[in-house]
Each structure stands twice: as structure tokens, then as C-alpha cells.
Image (cartoon, coloured by chain):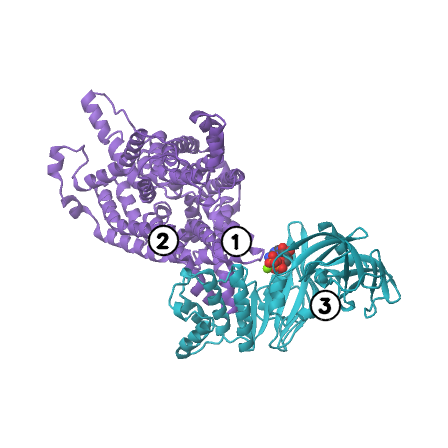
Amino acid sequence: MISISHLMKEFTVTDGKVAALNDLNIEVDPGEFFVIVGASGSGKTTLLRSVAGLETPDTGTIKIADRTVFSNEPPVWIPAQERGFGMVFQSYAVWPHLTVYENVALPLREGAQKIPGNEVEGRVKEALEMVQLEEQIHRPSTLLSGGQQQRVALARAIAVNPSVLLMDEPLSNLDARLREDVRGKIRDLAKNLGATVLYVTHDQIEAMAIADKIALMSFGKLLQYGSPIELYRNSNCAEVAEFFGTVNWLPGELDGDVVKTKIGDFSASQKAITDKNVWVGIRPEHLAFPEESYSAKPNHILADLQNSIFLGDQYTFEATASDSALQGKSRSAPKLQSDKLHMAVDPDDIMVFAADDSNTTFINASLVDK
Amino acid sequence: MVLAALPMFVIVVLVGVLISISFQSGIIGTADAKFTLSNYVDLFSDPIIEEALYNTIIFSITATLVSMGIGLPIAWLTERTTMRAKSAVYAIMTLGLLIPGIYTAMGWTFLAHSRIGFLNRWAVEYFSLSEAPINIATPIGMGFVQGLSLAALAFILTAQMFRAMNPSLEEAAKIHGLGFIGTMRRVTLPLAMPAILAAVIYIVVIGIATFDVPAIIGLANRVYMISTYVFEKANPGDEEFSQHGITAALGVIMIGVALLLTWWYSTVLRQGDKYQVVTGKGYRPTLIDIRNWGKVAWTFIILYIIAAKIIPLVLIGYAAFVPYLAPPSAKMFSLMSLDGIMENMDWDLVVRGLKNTVLLVLIVPAATLILAFSISWLIIRSRSRARYVLEFGAFLPHALPEVILAVAAILLSLFVLKDFVPLYGTITLIAVVYVITRISFATRAINSALLQIHKELEEAAHVSGLSEIRTSWRILVPLLRPTLMSVWIWSAILVYRELTVAVFLVGHDNITLPAVIWSYWNSGATNLAAAVTLIMTLVLTPLVLMFWWFGRKSMMSN
Ligand SMILES: Nc1ncnc2c1ncn2[C@@H]1O[C@H](COP(=O)(O)OP(=O)(O)OP(=O)(O)O)[C@@H](O)[C@H]1O
Ligand SMILES: [Mg+2]
């Protein structure tokens, strides 16, 4: 549905140039709920605005349902007005001089589709019902709460029946509780409409909760995209792994089927790694407490418990094994076997990354932060 | 884009024509014209120019001192002290801004002219003086009158500055033991200095180029300023030829000076910005308690109003109905009637003037708004490099003295366009110059309003499929309406009362109402001039009230 290839965009700023989009390639299937995540300044908004037609990329192509809307060679540029998308802005951009009704009606009446006057009212009502705003229909939009304005923006975007819906951090101005509630509704709404959604957020939990697919961006580059579980379990680099949750990093050496580290061996049989120097990554939630007593086997760790905190739904704890600090999370309290903590990791949960420049730099920086 | 570039194009042409004619002699504008520097040489060897220059300097200094001397204390009192009824001060000062300088000038001529001035007559009578003690028709006298009429502007300029100043700086000084005088001298004034200096330069620029007050008071008495000298050169008596080359040369020099001063002004302003240590929204400055001094302050303000606005208006009313000018007395009051006006007034002329003025008031503000809106939109929203050029272009007319623009327009229509478009003596020519002179102000006002409108409001319309034009019409214009309204009415008022460009450009057919006043005044028919002024005021009042109404609304919505 949306196909982006080799997209580049540089901004000139006072101290040089910023590559906001750096050779981006993305395919979004029809009807997919596609979420773009990344740290602040990674280029998410620029990508979304380029798709919307509000920003002109430097090079590359953007195709929507096989229609090229941007390309530098041959030059093609379809302005935003003619792309026929719906968009929810971070500021909502609800027109303050119009009522709720007029906000939704204006694009229908005077937009590209020019819906006949007698149909407009029905369409507006339908859209407002979907977001449960029919009660406020004739209110001036300035008298709405933040959550209500967000819904007006949503209604306005879906009223035109767009095949593509773009949303730039639509929930960032809502309070935490409302956010969880609304994100589910947005997903349901989009699925009912059958629209393809491109959704920007910087919150990885939000992304995991609503996405069919997630794309992770960093400094204008696309690191990886795929289903939430793929990105969580089969991260293609250390940065992706760490974006979706804390990771305990251990340097090690590959030796046949196992990686040897200071705190023991870990199996790496299914990992397609050939480098000798590697990083082993273990998520805190994957540390389990086996019943049997400890013996030096692959994937088993003997450590000293430093502390443990009870948080109601879980425990978090810190342990050290051969000077390496490990963070853990568990449902039950950490169990000691004669003063020592015995932990084990399922081989499927072990992550192994080549100790190349980019992974090592990233991990060292993140170890310093911890 | 074309709309936005239009005013710039006109300005460039006007300045270009001025420069090129300043270097021509012989039959200007034809192939016979010769390139020469003689215009500049003649200009500097004219003895009157030296006198005019000297007069202008004295005049500007006096006007600046008087206007700042009145405006600055009132601004400080309203913004920084516990003086009461502050909104009334704002109301009075804004109205003061709207009452034209010619009113004050006419009123003070009646009051203090060496021959007819009532004050002089009384003084001579009661103190048996041999000659009049006051003469308003001197550079200092005219500067005083101009200062009275510019005080409102000085107030507005400096009140903004006092409002933006961070009060915690003053408070810090107080906490560290500086008294009221110490704080004033060590903190308040140094902080305020750049803004005060900027206001001074601004007023000096106006003073140098101003025409109406020196023309009303000084021209009949042959006391010349640079601006009135330009007028004499461009409109000589029957026996002389107009010396367009010399006028153009003087214009070029004046543009140079004005640009320099404006450049200085903006540098000073920028320096002032450095000091604006975060003011934060919604802070409440602690006000200085002036207790009973409040009464003194209000007396000062009321005296100013009486001197600058009320006396002139009352005297104009008086002068319109008396058969000859003499100080008010029982006898004069018994002689008051409408007869003089009815018999001598050329009603044809007045109606023609009114018609033209109404036409200008309808066309000029609308055209100004459309052009200024296009320029602003390009400056604020487009990323093209053209926006810097536009920004400068929109700012330029602000720096160019109106007198010079008028002269350039005459030269353009007489020598360059005469064979293609007969613009000379038409209302179109006046309209074009009016639009040019108003565009800077309008652009600046719309710029700052447009900056407040979140860009995503427009983008939301684009994504929804609304075209550029529809987006402007449905989203931007309604959101900008308060600003557009006040700019529109403000321009209408300025156009309505304009008496500088008009005096240069009017002829038989395109005369405007203020120019009618001017021509009566100039021919010595003071009672008719006063009567037309009264008619003009009657029409002006509703406009001013409208401005007041919309101005308040737009202030509230911001
Ligand atoms: N108009 C612009 N001019 C100059 N630089 C820009 C412009 N817009 C974006 N940038 C730069 O491009 C980079 C990417 O910006 P972008 O807004 O796309 O980031 P983002 O991922 O949306 O960040 P956030 O999560 O903070 O919204 C940043 O370094 C930003 O400073
Ligand atoms: Mg963003």
C-alpha cells in the first residue's frame, strides 16, 4: 500500500546538516497498522510529513497503492491536497474558529472529494458517533477538553474515508490513563474502516500494544521493522533489543555451540553468528529460578543477590556474578540456595550479537548509563 | 507571489526614477537630457537649504524633547505605578494617536500666531507690550506643536517597553539595598535606555520628514523645513519653473539619511532585545505606590489633553463660525453664524474632496490588506529565499519619507509614464502611493499575528484536500480577522486624514478633503478651512469609534 524506497532528506541547520531521513526503505501492506518508533529527533515526524506531502524529500520515491506521489527521478510531486489522506496532528490542529460539526464538515464539503451538501450531515454524524462525540456536535471547538479535541481531530481524519491514515503522536497530549484507553479505540476504529495506518510514537509500550508492524528509527536510519514479537525476540542489533526493554549485556567468545563469558557458558546453537567476539544479551524477565541445585552447565548462573524489591505485581532484583551486575524481574521472590542465587535462561531467550563497532559502541554507552 | 512582489516593484521603480532624474538636466525624461551633477551642486549652493536644514534640526530636537517629555513619564506612570484609571489613559492616548497633527497645528496657530494668536493679543492688551511675546511660526514653536501631537506615539512606544521589562530585576536591586532613586538610576533607566533611544530615533525620523505641521504653520510665514522646501521646489509660484532635478537630488539625500537612521534604529532595537531577560507569561509586576502623587499625575495628563487636543478642537470650532479672527469675547460670540461658511464655501470642491477621500478610504485599505497578507504569508510560511528580499522590501517604505515618495510619484508620472498611462493628477496615483506608504505597518502587524497561528492548522486543511486559496480563505482569514480588522480601520483612518502625499499629488479632479482644508488655509480663508475640518471630524468620529471597538476585541482575543 505504502512503499518507500531510498528516501533521503537533509535539513540545513546553523551548525551544518542533519540527515533527518537516511536511505529509508519501507513496505506497508494494505490495512496494516504500522507504527514508527524512535528516540526524539530520529526523523519520525519528517517521514510522516513526507508521506503526507507536507515535506519534500531530497531523493527517493514514495508510492501509495502503486501511484507515485513523490520521486526525484523522474521528478514527481503530488501535493498534500491531492493525496487524499487523513491525518491527526500532534497539536490536533482543530480549527479554533469552527464548531465541532464544522471542523469535520469542512474537508468533506471543500476538500478534494467535494461531497454533495445533502450527504455531508450524515457523514459528519457518522464520524462523530464513531468517536463518541455526537453530544458535543455544535460546541465551539475551543470549549473542548484535550481528549475531546483529540477525538475531533480523529473524526475529521476518518470522515473523508481515507485509505491511508497518518497520525503523529496523537496521544502525547493526553494523560496516562486516557492514553491507554484511547489507543485501543484507535486501533479498533482503524481496523473497522480497513484503513492503512502510519502511526508515530516514541513510546515502545504504546507501539507494541497497537502495532501490526513496528519500524524503529535512529538518527534518520531505519534499524529494523517487523511484528512486535519479531523486534522483541529477534532484534537484528543491540540497539533494537535495548529499545524494547532492558538487557543485561555480557561480552563473550564464541566457541562451537556455546559462548563463553565470565559468568558461564550460554548456548548459541540457533544463532547465525560466525564472529568470534560477541555480546550476549539476557533480558531481566528471562531469568528464572530452577528447582534443582546449581551445577556448571550452559545457561545456568550462580550469583550473589544484592537486593530485591517487591512492586506488587512483580519483584525486581540485582545480583552480581563474577563482578558482573545483573538485573532481574520475576513473579515470585528470588529463591536462595544456601545463600546463593541460582538462575537459568531458556536457550530460546538468549540473544547473541556480533561485537562489531556499532553494537560495541552502543552497548558500552548503555553500560555507562547504568 | 505576483501580488507580493508588486509593491516592491513599485518602490524600486520610484526610487530608481528619483535617482536617475537627480542626475539629469535639460529636458528631463527625453533623449535630450544630459547626465550631470549640477543638481547636487545647485542644491548645496542654495542659501535657503542651509536655513531649512538648520530649522529642521531645531524642529526635530524640540519635537522629540516635548513628545518624550510628555509620553515617557505617562508611560512609566501607567505601567509601573499605582496610578488609577489606567485604561482611561490608554483610551485617551490611542485617541490622541488618531487626531491628526493638522488639528493641533491649526489650533495653535489661532492661539499663538504672532499676529492673530489670541494669547499674543491678550498679552499685548493686558501687559501693554509693544510686540507679540510668543511666535509659533519658529522652528521651536512648530517643534512644540509637533511634539504635542507625537506625544501619544512616544507613550505607546515606551509603554510597551516598560511592560516587557522584567520587574524582578528591579526587585533584586531593591532587596540588595538600593532605594527608589538608586534603583531608578542604576537599574530601571539603564535597562530602558535602548528602548528609549529607539523611540527617540523613531520620532526623530518622523520629525525630519514630517510635512503637515511645518506646512500649516510655517509655509505662510516663509519658515522652511526640508520637507516644505521640497514642496516649494516641486510646486513653485507661477513665475518660476519647477526644479525637478534639484528636488530629486534632495530626495536621494533624504533617502540616504532616512535609511541610515532606520538602520541605526534597528540595531538599537536588537540591542534592547538582549536585555529582555525572560519575562515569562502572566507575571505581576509589583507596582510602585505613588499615593497622592496620583492626582498630580492625572493633572499632568489632563493638561496635556487640553493643550494638545481640546483647545485646538474648540478653537477650530470657534474659527469656523466667526466672520473674522479675533480673541473670543461677548461681541465675537454675538457675531457667530453660519453665513460666512454658506456664502463663501465652494461646495462643489468640498463634495469633490469628500467623494475622492471616500473612494480612497474604500480602495486603499483593502488593497493594502490583500498585498500585505500575501507578503506576510510568503515571509512567514514559505521557505524560499525570496522571503528575505520581501521582508526588506516591505520594510523599505517605512524608512522612506512620504514627501520623497510623493515627489518620486510626481516625477514618475510626469516624465516616465506620461506617454503610456496618464496618471498625473489622477486619484489612482494617490492611491498607489498611499498603499506603498501603508504597507510596512500592515505587513508587520499581520506578520506577528500569523506567527501566532500554529502551522499545523493550515497543514490539516491541506491534508484534508483544501487548496491553498481555500485554506487561506477558510482557515487563515477567519483566524486573523481581529488583526485584519484593526489594520483595515487603522489604514482607513490614516488615509482619511492624510495630508502630505495629498498636498503634493492633488490637482483639480483628484483633490482630497484634507487637501481642501489645506488649500483654504493656504489662501488665508481660515474660517473655511476650520469649517471643512469640522465636516471632516464628523465623518472621522465613527471610524475612530469602530477602530476602538475592534481594537479592543482583538486585544481581548490575543
Ligand atoms: N524544518 C526543519 N529545519 C531544520 N531541521 C529540522 C526541521 N525539521 C526537523 N529537523 C531536524 O530533523 C531531525 C528529525 O526531526 P523529526 O522532527 O523528524 O524528529 P522526530 O523523530 O519526530 O522527533 P520527536 O520525537 O522529538 O518529535 C531532527 O534533528 C530535527 O532537528
Ligand atoms: Mg515528531
Q: Name the element at disc 3.
A: helix
Q: Are marks 3 and 1 in contact (CB under 8 Å)?
A: no
Q: What letter labels the chain drawn in cyan?
A: A
Q: What number is the disc on residue A182?
A: none
Q: Name the element at disc 2.
A: loop
Q: Nearer the viewer, mark 2 or mark 3?
A: 3
Q: In the image shown, does A88 or A192 lie closer to the viewer?
A: A192
Q: Can you name the residue that lies furthest to the front here?
A: A338
Give the letter of the chain under mark 2: B
Give the letter of the chain under mark 1: B
| Residue denoted by label 3 | A233
Q: In the image shown, does B134 or B194 lie closer to the viewer?
A: B194
> Would you say the beta carbon of the disc 3 residue lies within 8 angstroms of ligand 1?
no
If the picture is divided into quarters, which one holds ligand 1?
bottom right
Q: Earlier in the sequence, mark 1 or mark 2?
A: 1
Q: How many marks do you count on the picture? A: 3
